Image (cartoon, grey):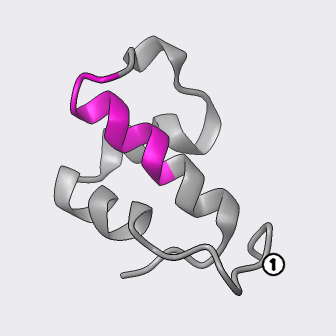
Amino acid sequence: MPATSKAQQMAAGAALSAKRGETKKSELKGASKEMYESMSEKQLEEFAETKRKGLPEKKK
């Protein structure tokens, strides 16, 4: 499932980075923290790999 906004795509990227141990979980805030806790690494990859071109800044 692709991300529906740039903000969602970036939050998924941050959560994925923490899941892989590249950043600290304590650095996550808001949506990325929720995504980290509720989604698998594979799901986060699908959201994070979405191309940003043509996506709105925020989901309406």
In percent of the image, x 38 and y 20: which residue is there? 23
Q: Which amino acid is tagged 1?
A: Lys
- Judge left or right: residue 39 versus residue 35: left
Residue visible at 63% across and 36% down in the picture: 30
Residue 53 locus on image (x, y percent): 66, 81
> What span is in magenta?
12-22
**Looking at the figure, which quarter contains the N terminus?**
bottom left
Determine whether 2 is above or below 17 in the image: below
Name, please, the residue furthest toward the bottom: 54
Percent across and percent down for residue 48 are 42, 61
Residue sitting at x 29%, y 53%: 39
Dot 1 alpha-carbon crowd within 10 angstroms: few under 14, some 14 to 19, many 20 or more: few
The answer to whether residue 15 is above or below residue 38 is: above
Q: Position of residue 51 (x, y in %)?
A: 52, 76
Q: To which quarter of the image does residue 18 belong? A: top left
Secondary structure type for disc 1: loop
Asked if residue 55 lies left or right of residue 27, the reply is right
Total residue callouts: 1
Check if residue 15 falls in the magenta segment. yes
Look at mark 1 in the image and give the residue it sits on: 60
Q: Is 9 situated above or below 39?
A: below
Q: Quadrant of residue 8?
A: bottom right
Q: Position of residue 58 (x, y in %)?
A: 78, 67
Which is the main secondary structure of the residues drawn in magenta? helix
